[in-house]
Amino acid sequence: MSRMRNVCFFNTVSFWGGGEKLHLEYALKFKERGYHICLATVKGSPLAMKAEQAGLATFDIRAGNLSFLNPLKYLRLYRFYKTEKIDTVIFSGSPDLKLGGFAAKLAGVANIVYLRGLAAPVKNSFINRLLFSRVLTHIVANSGATRTTILQNLKTTVDPHKVKVIYHGIDLELFDSRISEEIPAVFRDRPGVLLGNAGRLTSQKGQQYLIELARMLKRKNICFTLFIAGTGEMKPELEKMISRYDLQKEVVLLGFVEEVETFMHAIDIFILTSLWEGFGYVIVEAMAACKPAIAFDLSSNPEIIENNHSGLLVNFPDMEMFCDKVESLIKDESLRRQFGMNGRERVEKYFQLDDRITEFENCLLNGHISESIQR
């Protein structure tokens, strides 16, 4: 059994995203369970500010791709680990792992944990082989799809039994409490069934397929409004597509949405067009709000959506099929309601935050995970 008392969550990403949200949630839950918590992060970053507002200790550090070559940063981290008596350090990003992982090994940190949420192959480099074979004590993937990509290029380096799958979870009590029953003005008096998507506007998220979907639905004279929440580099391209296809009345780019819970509550159907997801947390949020979800049958999506029960999966990149499935739910309110109820039940059963925290804690303490989730 591993010792664990002083836990450091190591995340130097300067923007706020799913990984940063997870680190903060896990840090707060671990604190509730009596652990001493510190976040190694960039001073002034959203994660640092939210952590400080929540009363968590922070340590200012920056990590870039070549930071692991900087001896001064190693020395700072070595002293930090020793001074704070850190026995467990948890990483998600590659630059953080390279810098903080090697420093943790030198400092004698007992548990060096990689909590990977990226369903993309790990490069078979000398540094990665060294990290995965000699430095990391625990490797946790956020989905079966992510686990597969970890092992894809490191089959001869990593023991498959060492890579555990632990899904992310949602705090349903907090989620429900944040839903405003008053529908925001932007959603009011909009024509037809309300479709929704949320995520960074990037090529990975595939929002161009949403615009194509809207174009196809309009050609069929189906009444709908599509809301796309998020910011990112693809916004100008999406705006051009909306204008080119004359979809200004049907498609609304909302920008960044703070109240995701209310967004999910306001829409009727959630649509995800991502090309891959380590773990589609946004799908879980939609299901928590009792909304049916439609997504490509890719990556971790089929691990979350139970096809024809809590939502629908579409062969990639078959947009005709995607359009047909969206149309079927638009025209069948009772089916939308049933899928929504089934989705909420699935979240309650498999994706409760406290359950997943317990599973993660047991993995670190005892080296095993529960078998409660059918994978």
Image (spheres, rainbow, N blue to C red):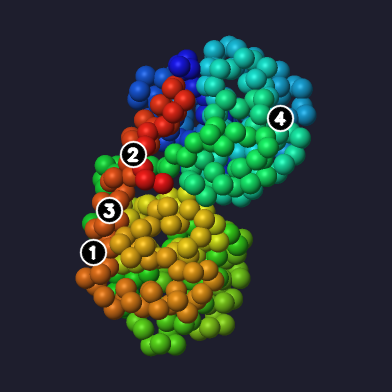
Name the residue: 51% across, 60% down: 298
Residue picked out by circle 1: 338
Q: Relative to 265, does residue 144 appear above or below in the rendering?
A: above
**Contact between labelled residues 2 and 3, with CB atoms less than 8 Å apart:** no
Comes first in the chain, label 3 or label 4? 4
Q: CA distance from mark 3 to mark 1?
A: 10 Å
Q: What SS does tag 4 mark? A: helix
Comes first in the chain, label 2 or label 1? 1
Residue 142 x, y percent position in the rendering = 48, 43
- Camera-near label (3 vs 2) is 2
Residue 52 x, y percent position in the rendering = 46, 29
Q: What SS does tag 3 mark? A: helix
**Contact between labelled residues 4 and 1, with CB atoms less than 8 Å apart:** no
Q: CA distance from mark 1 to mark 4?
A: 49 Å
Q: Where the N terminus falls, by quadrant?
A: top left
Comes first in the chain, label 3 or label 2? 3
Name the disc covering residue 344, or none: 3
Q: Relative to 192, does residue 72 appear above or below in the rendering?
A: above
- Camera-near label (2 vs 1) is 2
- Three-letter amino acid code at the position of disc 2: Ser
- Three-letter amino acid code at the position of disc 1: Gln
Residue 81 x, y percent position in the rendering = 59, 17
**Contact between labelled residues 1 and 3, with CB atoms less than 8 Å apart:** no
Return the residue nearer the eye: 173 or 187.
Answer: 173
Q: Is residue 172 left or right of residue 281?
A: left
Q: CA distance from mark 4 to mark 2?
A: 33 Å
Name the disc covering residue 130, or none: 4
Disc 3 crowd rating (10 Å Cα; few below 14, some 14-19, many 20+) is many
